[in-house]
Image (cartoon, helix red, strand yellow):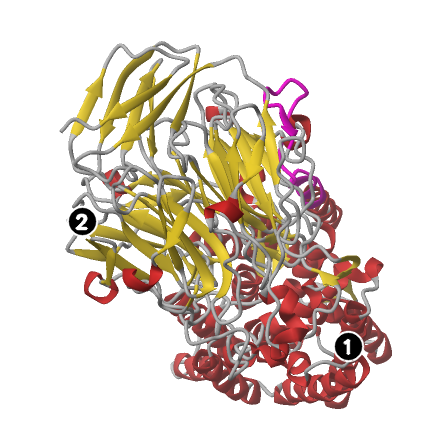
Amino acid sequence: MTAAPAQAPARSIVAAAIDPRYLIVFLITLVLVVGEARYNILGGYDRLATTLGVCLATEVLLSWWLRGRVANLASAYITGISLALLTKPQANILWPFALGAFLAIASKYVLTYRGRHLWNPSNFAIALLVLVAADSVAILSHQWGNDLRINLVIWTFGLAVAWRARVLHVTLTYVACFVVLAVIRNAIVGGPVLAELAPITGPMYQLFVFFMVTDPRTTVSTRRGRMLVVAIVALVETLIRLAGDFQISFLRPFYVSPPILALAIVGPIAMFLDLRRTGKTVG
Amino acid sequence: MKRLVTTLAFVAAIIAVVVLNGRAAGSVAGANEAIHLSEVAHASGIDFVHQAPTLDPKVEHIAAHIAALGACVSVADINNDNWPDLYFTSSRFGAANALYLNQQDGTFRDGSAHAGIASLNRAGEGVSMGAVWGDYDNDGFEDLLVYKWGYPQLFHNLGDGTFVDVTAQSGLRVWMNSNGAVWFDFDRDGLLDLYITGYFRSDIDFWHLRTTRIMQHSWEFANNGGKNLLFKNAGKGRFVDVTDSLGVGSTRWTLAAAAADFNDDGWPDLYLANDYGPEELFLNREGRVFELARAGLEDDSKSGMAVALGDVYNRGRHDVFVTNISVKGFLFQGNNLRLNFLKELGRFDEVATGVVADAGWAWGAQFGDLNNDGLLDLVVANGFISADSTRDYWYAMSKIAGAQGNIFEDAKNWPPIGRASLSGYERSRVLLNRGEAGFVDVAEQAGVTDRLDGRSVAMADLFNRGVLDVVIANQRGRALLYRNAAPTGHWIEFKLIGTRSNRSAIGAEVTVEFGNVRQRQVVDGGMGFCGQNDRRLHFGVGNGRLGRVTIRWPSGRVQILDGLTIDELHVITEPK
């Protein structure tokens, strides 16, 4: 390690302050603090301590062991908080948090192609848990008081951060596709149109559109490609939702959490194809 | 090599998830667990079938969801023959409630028409949602309060097998959409007071809806439910609304309440199970005011549906069991078993795991020592809507559940339920208490295999055999009577008669010492979900030697009894 020039620290601080990762860190911390203070969204600090602790420890250990240096921990921090908020298991069990956290971070080192991981870590862990551990784990379905004011705060900050992080086009494309497809679903299945639009006004979607679908490490390389991928995610989500509406029983494990599982299906395929097309290899 | 080790660890973690998930169903009983129940309702002359309400067509698309309440059972000896009788409520206009009189020979006879407490479900008056018994005028006969979606009705027991409606002069004719009530003497003046809980707002008339904005505005912190009301018994059959001055007018969606002295200060407190919100404990400050306690409840918001009190580990405390919802993949709220540490720590500790936590969509529950081994077991009724088993409303409900409150507060935004089931065909649970070894589900071995939509549970020694039998009222289904095969353990029972206290002795607390432990029970004026156990208290004492028995009467008088014989009912009158 060499000494930095005298002016470097000041520039580093400025750079760090505007690094999109830290904006995301700020946003998810805001979600956590506001939600916990107002609505006790965690369901116990032991859950947060477990997920955050295991995520950070796994990141430190695996990055040092496999790559010879300790990775920046912002990603593990975001993953840990996301998992703590999204995982809703049976009463008084902690293993889904511990194992989910380990699997999320480890997936970045195991499920790779050309040096890039294919799944958003928390998306992978949540999808795996709800698919193979449905007797023990559910996903956040409603929380945070269903409170419009809280949600407006988070949407406002979320959109601002997405804009600053240059992923607003991803978020807006997804939201637009969701709305259009909700109207189409409503035309197919009937019932109140607000019932189809309702999910996107809830907290799970905040975490989804601001922290998962926009993850720069697991999105494709071109702006147009990212918009296309997220539109396909919304389309697959709609297919899963229609499976729910038409009660296709063998797909039941999927329609407990349509957007998460749609991303878990589409995301890695898109990443694989993109990496293959561009021929990039990350060392 | 490093990558291989990492990959192996990754695969091992996935295997661990699968293995641990396989254990999620919890422990099951061995074949030798000692509870045996036989369903004998029909053979005993009980053929009651609950009928659900019909509602305004504006909410027809989710009527099956809204109208899924009202099947309730309460126990009382209405004719003082020392044999417990049963009262069931139905909830459709024209459908009759039923009073089953104990014939002292293992059978019951429907005596409700003669008694005048059958035809209560009438247009303009509302439909029955449950009932609680208490001798409000201390004349020696148990009177009846029927709470409704509509006007509650108070019936005075004339002592000759008939009742007269005294609602109009009582001051209780207030339209409510209530699903619970408890009798208790909050000011210890010897007269039973009445706490009636509100579920839907009281300005809602379900047969003439002016708006469809009638639902909860939050799934977790809703406070737009009906206001709970406390009525002080002013004597001479008059009740006065003292809700606001006493500070107990919660507008959470209260589904159940129970009263007992949780903090050992000698005054009965109120514990509320609220749907779409946290439970509430109102501590009674010497009958002058109630204070909402911060006792570890406020951070834990679920869908509380019943409050059952029991001294789970024989510590001489009222622990609390509150039912909630669990459904695979969608929602794991888990039932709460809250151990009472109010005196030491100022809070309850939630310790439910396994079969105690996860019983499905759980409704009524009651503690009772079903095998007389000295430990309180637990019966839980489950299941919400059993309709077309091939269609499930959970997915549709999950769409609306994640929305903003102002969307799902309006019933018209809810997806139609049609013929779909919603946590239907779930079985009741019989949880055997093994002390430090925890609870184990013995329902199937015990003979409890019904998959009706259970709502209310009540326990009583219906046939005076020294064993607790179990009665379950089912929504849109027949009532069940589970007769308990006589277990081998010893027992003791108490029928308490108040003198300075209310004559029903509701709120009296009895602590029985046996072996090296002591168990505490309270005479309840309503407990579980829209249920009420027999006022007689039943203690299993196993093979333990009976020690001292302490009765704390609602008046405050403490009576200590030594040398009582076991395997016997003791009728104790409060010393004057």
**Residue designated by label 1:** A238
Q: Secondary structure at mark 1?
A: helix
In this picture, residue B197 sits left or right of residue A111: left
In the rendered structure, does residue B27 fall within the stretch colored magenta?
yes
Image coords of residue B83 (percent x, y): 45, 28
**Place of residue B301 in the rendered image (x, y in percent of width and height, measured from the top left):** 45, 59
Q: Amino acid at mark 2?
A: Asp
Q: Is residue A167 above or below residue A67?
A: below
CA separation, marks 1 and 2?
59 Å
CB within 8 Å, label 1 to label 2? no
Q: Which residue is mark 2?
A: B187
Q: Residue at x 57, y 25 (%)?
A: B106
> Of B119 and B494, which appears nearest the observer?
B119
Report the chain holding disc 2: B
Q: What is the x, y in percent for residue B505?
A: 28, 36
Magenta: main secondary structure equals loop
In the rendered structure, which segment of residues is drawn in magenta?
B17-40
Q: Is residue A156 above or below residue B564?
A: below
**Viewer-nearest residue: B418 or B78:** B78
Mark 1 chain? A
Pair 1/2: label in front: 2
Asked whether residue A64 appears in the rendered view, the answer is: no
Q: Is disc 2 surrounded by few (<14), some (14 to 19) or many (20+) residues within 10 Å? A: many
Mark 1: which amino acid?
Answer: Thr
Q: Nearer the viewer, residue A268 or B143?
A: B143
Residue B383 appears left or right of B181? right
